[in-house]
Amino acid sequence: MPRSLKFWANDSVVLPGYSMRVTRLQPRNFKQFLWVTCFLPILLWVNSAIAEPSWKLCPPQDFLVPETTVNSADQSTRISADDVTGRYDDAIQFQGNVILEQAGRQIEATDVTITKDKNIEARGGIRASDGKLDVRAAQAVFEEKNKLSHFTDVEYTYKPRHAYGKADEIKTVGNISTLKNSTYSTCPAKKNGWEIKARKITLDRDKGLGTAKNAVFRFKDIPFFYLPTVTFPISGERKTGFLFPQFGRGDPTGAELELPFYWNIAPQYDATITPRIMSKRGVMLQNEFRYLSARHKGSLQVNYLPNDNKTDEDRELFALHHAGKPGKKWQLNLDGSHVSDDDYLDDFGNSLRLGSISHLQRQADLRYSDRWFTFAALGRAYQTIDPNISDTDKPYRLLPQLDFRATLPKDFHGLALSLDSQYTRFSHSVNVNGDRLDIVPRLSWRKDAPAWFFQPAFSWHYTQYDLDNLDLERNLPVVSLDSGLFFERFTENDNIQTLEPRLFYLYAPLRQQDNIPLFDTSEPVFNFPSLFRENRFSGRDRVGDASQLTFALTSRHLDSNSGQENWRASIGQILYFKDREVSLNNTAPETDTRSSFAAELSYTPGTKWVARSTIVASEDLNETERFNLTLGYRGNNRRLANLEHIYRRDDLQQTGISFGWPLNQRWRLLGRWLYSHDESRDIDILGGLEYESCCWKARLVGQRYVTDDENEYNDNISLQLVFKGLASFGEGSQLLQERITGYETDDE
């Protein structure tokens, strides 16, 4: 059984930032490893994120100067000292505990001299701050005319990025500081996390960008590589440049190296261009363009691999996502994907979710919304990428689909009138084609009281079909009557428990519909909400005949102080007065006089626990037909745990467990397990260990999941290093967020 041991970058370009990744190297990987490490020094880095990393594990940055409260607009100078000598028209010298405040700047020193031309010279125990850059130095000179400051023998912190470093000297002109023979890190002083050591570092606060020349990147006191030039963010703004490279190994692709380049085109546009070098496949170019404005946002992704080394064919992916408001009441959504072949996602994806996709949808949706009505025009098509799906089972294309819905205000004693209409043209390469017009006016009246409600409703379903060789028409009324009672009692602890019986009657006459094609209609899974549906089918090609009465009971437990619902339990059943003859595929009528029991249970005893369950049992309660259970825990310090169980009689039974549990303040254990009882095998296994310090984070994650070929597995193992402030965006842990419900990361 072939397996892949790989560290993956995400198959989609998501502006991954400085997430450094390594794979466990085998001897056959050694040449690729040498090539990668030799190539790294020529790269520029830049952070593409806007958000700020978390510094929650860092000690306070108060070793230099106290927080200054000097107003930068105040140009006056205030000085205090133990002794003052000199003349006003000449140099003035201040000695002993000198504190100088001027134009948003605070300076403390043993000895300060103000020269005749208003320059400031400071010596001995200097501590200076402008509110963002704090400095401790041996000597300093401030030239007022040139807006220049010069420090020697320096320690500094840059507060906006939680940065710390040392330098032989720092020269600042305006908002640009130049550091010689210096270091830069977001780690605390005297902590051996990561740092950049360079002959020259420039911090440009106007551009929000730091640049280091002739630099060495060190981690845990070990020099990793030499960098002729490296750029890094000193603000939350996005910057153009190379992102941290990503490399790994996978069975379908071989050794991999990704070299993402981030292009900050404009405040509202950006792009990421990523060469993805694969030893078994060749070089794929991955591109993502993003845009954002007051009315529109979206992305365009294009991946292209010319002449795949394995298949000798071009491979590509195209994806477009757009959401916009072309007018005050208009909304436009475009969403579509295309791949060159059925195996693209299997070969270049990295998850069970991608491998299980059967259809790629393409849809355009234009919508107008007014106070009382909405109009929508939609087009939808699919690319089927599962070769096991026959032509007849492929979905229809919808072009166009026009929807008009109107609802009059309920301003006449609860009377409501609505109209739901839709015109759709269905086309298919094999099955029957046709147009469908469906119009459903509905009249209802609702009366509410503190202890009861009553709502009758009447609707008329008119449907017209213009098929290839046949015209059809369907007319039928649907009548429903919904009613309920509300009872309350106080429990022993003065909370409230309710008892809410509900009756729902439905009548729809029989209309023969066997000759109507099934364009978009199916029978949804039976559950508790199904007890109150006016049509047991989804879609518009079938309207079920009905003469039935639903009995349901709900009980809720409410906190009398906060009104929070602690738990809710509901159960119900349908009593049929006649057989149901309308079916999807000309099957025999349903003759049962009672439906299965459907029940729901939710339990939320506070902010930490939540439990939800749905049950469908046979009409005599002797057998469970379907059962879903979800149990979740969200505790303090990022504790989380989930339990899921799914059961469908004679079809499916799976159990899933996932968790994220801190071992202490810095270490966290992560995991997920999905097991199929009916197949007696694992579907998805994931285990991880996460470590976080003040300025860096590491994740080790291993995964094993079923491939599209259900007799094989894929095995992945990855190590991710995140250097905060240098790696503040990164793709973070998208895999963990997909696999572990509730998992969150603060890498950004």
Image (cartoon, helix red, strand yellow):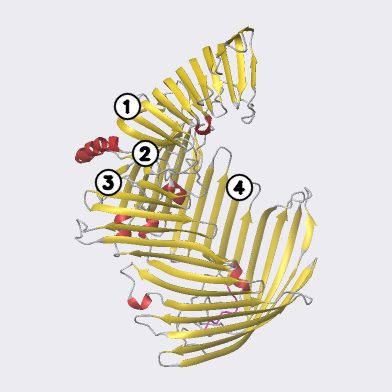
Q: Nearer the viewer, mark 3 or mark 2?
A: 2
Residue type of the residue flagged with mark 1: Pro
> What stretch of residues is rendered in magenta?
589-595
Q: In this view, does 436 lie above or below 736?
A: below
C-alpha gap between disc 3 and disc 1:
24 Å
Q: Is mark 1 on a helix, strand or loop?
A: strand
- Which residue is nearer to you in this view: 37 or 69? 69
Residue type of the residue flagged with mark 4: Trp
- Asked whether residue 580 is in view, the answer is no
Residue type of the residue flagged with mark 3: Glu
C-alpha gap between disc 3 and disc 2:
19 Å
Dot 2 or dot 4: first in sequence order is: 2
Q: Do the residues labelled 4 and 1 touch (CB within 8 Å)?
A: no
The crowding category of the residue bearing disc 1, from other C-alpha atoms within 10 Å (few below 14, some 14 to 19, many at least 20), is some
State the image quarter where residue 103 is shown. Answer: top right
Q: What element carries label 4?
A: strand
Q: Which of marks 2 and 4 is in front?
A: 2
Residue drawn at the location 21% of the way across and 51% of the way down: 280
C-alpha gap between disc 2 and disc 1:
17 Å
Q: What element carries label 3?
A: strand
- Which residue is nearer to you in this view: 413 or 78? 78
Dot 3 or dot 2: first in sequence order is: 2
In the rendered image, which residue does mark 3 sit on? 256
In the rendered image, which residue does mark 1 sit on? 223
Q: Is residue 594 magenta?
A: yes
In the rendered image, which residue does mark 2 sit on? 45
Dot 2 or dot 1: first in sequence order is: 2
Apparent side of residue 530 relative to residue 153 in the rendered image (left or right): right
The crowding category of the residue bearing disc 2, from other C-alpha atoms within 10 Å (few below 14, some 14 to 19, many at least 20), is many
Q: Do the residues labelled 2 and 4 touch (CB within 8 Å)?
A: no
Residue type of the residue flagged with mark 2: Trp
Q: Which label sits on residue 609? A: 4
